[in-house]
Image (cartoon, rainbow, N blue to C red):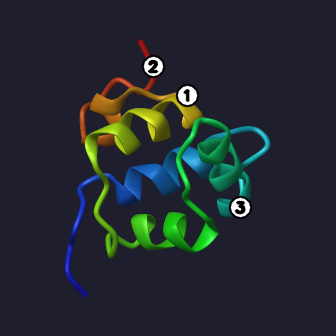
Amino acid sequence: MPNRNLVGPRVREARLKLQPPLTQAELAARMQISGFRLGRVAISKIEVRYREVDDRELVALAAALGVSAAWLLGEDAQTSE
């Protein structure tokens, strides 16, 4: 399986660290509220690095998860700015 994004593992990590943890469906709902048409299957594909993530989606995912885009890309700081 190709590695089509850098953020997939961190998306999953951030989703599961929330209290209570978010399901993929709940994250998809947050993304849809933000104007991004991502379903649960798309979130799953992102997490396993099968689906690419564009820059606008990266920013929206970070906001939905309460982390920074830099953290999703592998930086150390987790909180959003």
Give above or below for 13 relative to 39: above
Distance, label 2 to label 1, CA atoms, is 6 Å
The answer for how far apart the CA atoms under marks 3 and 1 are is 17 Å
Q: Secondary structure at mark 2?
A: loop
The disc label shown at residue 52, or none? none
Q: Given this view, does label 3 or label 2 mark the residue nearer the observer?
A: 3
Taking the image as shown, residue 76 lies to the left or right of residue 10, namely: left
Q: Residues within 10 Å of mark 2 (few under 14, many from 20)?
A: few
Look at the image and tell me in which quarter the N terminus lies: bottom left
Question: Which amino acid is tagged 2?
Answer: Ser
Depth check: give the residue in front, 20 or 55.
55
Residue at which label 2 appears: 80
Give the image location of residue 59, x and y in percent: 39, 33
Q: Earlier in the sequence, mark 3 or mark 2?
A: 3
Look at mark 3 in the image and give the residue it sits on: 25
Q: Where does the C terminus fall, quadrant-wise?
A: top left
User: What amino acid is labelled 1 in the image?
Assistant: Gly
* Residue displayed at 50% across by 68% down: 42
Tell me the residue that label 1 is attached to.
66
For this view, does 24 lie left or right of residue 41? right
Residue name at image x 53 percent, y 44 percent: 14
